[in-house]
Amino acid sequence: MITIYHNSRCSKSRGCLAILEEQKEGINVVNYLENPPSEEELKGILKLLGIPPFDLVRKNEAIWKENFKGKDFTDAELITILSNNPKLIERPIVVNGNKAIIGRPPEKVIDII
C-alpha cells in the first residue's frame, strides 16, 4: 500500500495525491499535521528517502526561522524537532514499500508507483 504524508493546504501535496488517485487504489492518506509521525517513523522515512534530517526541514517556515535557524543540531535533535513541529516537514512524502520520495514536483511520484 502507498502512504502519502499529506497537507491538504499545499498545492504540491494535492497534486501528488491526485496523481496517486489516478494511478493506484488503496492509498493511505496521512494528514501529518493532525497525526504527526513519531520519531521512529521519521527515522524510517529518512532511511527510505536516503537523506539526513536537515534535508527534510522546511527552512522558510516561520517556526524554523524564529526558533531554530542558525543553531547546530544533531540528527536525533532534528528528528525530535520535526516530530514536535510537523509543519516543518517537507511535503508531500510518499512511501511505497521500501521506497520513498518527496513529491516535488508532484509528477515525481510516478517513479515509485
Image (cartoon, helix red, strand yellow):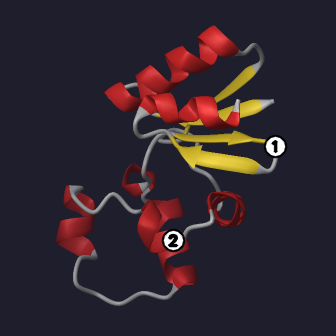
Q: Is residue 30 visible?
A: no
The three-letter code of the residue at mark 2 reads Pro
Q: 35 and 90: which one is in front?
A: 90
- Examine the rendered structure and indicate whether residue 76 appears above or below residue 12: below
Residue in view at x 46 percent, y 61 percent? 56
- The residue shown at (27%, 63%) is 59
The kind of residue tagged 1 is Gly
Q: Nearer the viewer, mark 1 or mark 2?
A: 1
Above or below, 68 against 12 in this view is: below
Residue 84 vertical position relative to residue 80 in the rendered view, above or below: above
Q: Which mark is residue 97?
A: 1
Residue 59 visible = yes
Residue 4 screen position, x and y as percent: 61, 34
**Residue shown at 47% from the left, 41% from the top:** 33
Q: Is residue 25 left or right of residue 33?
A: right
Residue 62 image position (x, y, % from top left): 19, 58
Indicate the quadrant containing the N terminus: top left, top right, bottom left or bottom right: top right
Seen at 35% across and 90% down, the residue is: 72
Label 1's element? loop
Location of residue 102 in the rendering, given as x and y in whole percent from the top left corner: 51, 46
**Residue identified by numbered label 2:** 53
First-in-chain label (1 vs 2): 2
